[in-house]
Image: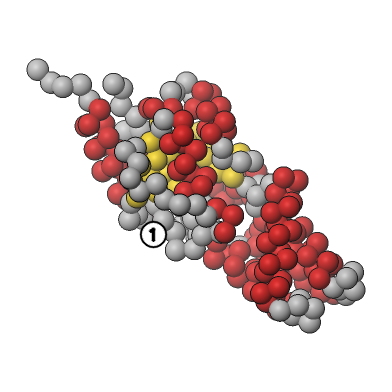
Amino acid sequence: MAPLSLIGVDADDTLWHNEPVFRMTHRRFNDLLSAYASEEELERRLAAIERRNLALYGYGAKGFTLSMLETALEVSADKCPTSTLKEVLMAGRELMAHPMEPLPGAREAVEALSRNHRLILITKGDLFHQELKLAASGLGSLFSGVEIVSEKSPDTYARVFERYGVAPQNCLMTGNSVKSDILPVLALGGWAALVPYPLVWEVEAAETPSDHPRFRELVTLADLPGFIAEIEGRRAPAGP
């Protein structure tokens, strides 16, 4: 059997920090709206509105900002002052402009992977914002392609793999989300490697398929080349 022909790599919380910045913005939002509801109630209402809006706005900071504004109006019964709404909007703008902070060892891992494999970045989120983060990371030249998608489903991955002319069984996806980066690719017959991140957005929560033969949970992204070598060694034709 052929070696792995394509390695897909997630972006947010795999190559650079993302969730901590969102949580910092959550705390600011809760402080701004504390006169109208408790922190627990604000988080519950915002989460519900976010989920409802994903189909309209997609993932990312822009959709999150619109959901914060909608939540502010809802919890205040449209009595939230303009000054507070401006503060919420500013929090969203600062979220968009927050400096991109690469994860330790991310560059070294991607450089190592790119020496022997074709890499593509596969990430959800706002197109403009994700392109900005990739440019700021300095990693763009190491990827053969960039796929910014609205959802990471088996159908999405199947279209991406087909576009690059590779069968799913010759592809591996790595990332921090079991729901988005692992399960859909395993469902197609591909390989998947989870690189856990300490914080997980509740929308991305899913049970880890710990006993799956084509899955491995890694400690860091630096462990991925070893897993790939193990896969390709296992799949290589027997020598004479």
Q: Residue at x 66, y 74 (%)?
A: 40
Q: Residue at x 31, y 38 (%)?
A: 213
Q: Position of residue 198 (x, y in %)?
A: 44, 63
Q: Position of residue 189 (x, y in %)?
A: 41, 30
Which residue lies most toward the right here?
Answer: 79
Callout 1: helix, strand or loop?
Answer: loop
Left or right relative to 204: residue 55: right
Q: Position of residue 123 (x, y in %)?
A: 55, 43
90 or 20: nearer the viewer = 20
Q: For the image shown, how many numbered marks are present on the structure?
A: 1
Which residue lies most toward the left here?
Answer: 240
Q: Residue at x 39, y 40 (%)?
A: 192
Left or right relative to 111: residue 54: right
Q: Which residue is mark 1?
A: 104
Residue 89 in the image: above or below residue 16? below
93 or 193: nearer the viewer = 193
Q: Position of residue 167 (x, y in %)?
A: 43, 23
Q: Which image quarter is the C terminus in?
A: top left
Residue 44 in the image: above or below residue 222? below
Which residue lies most toward the bottom here?
Answer: 35
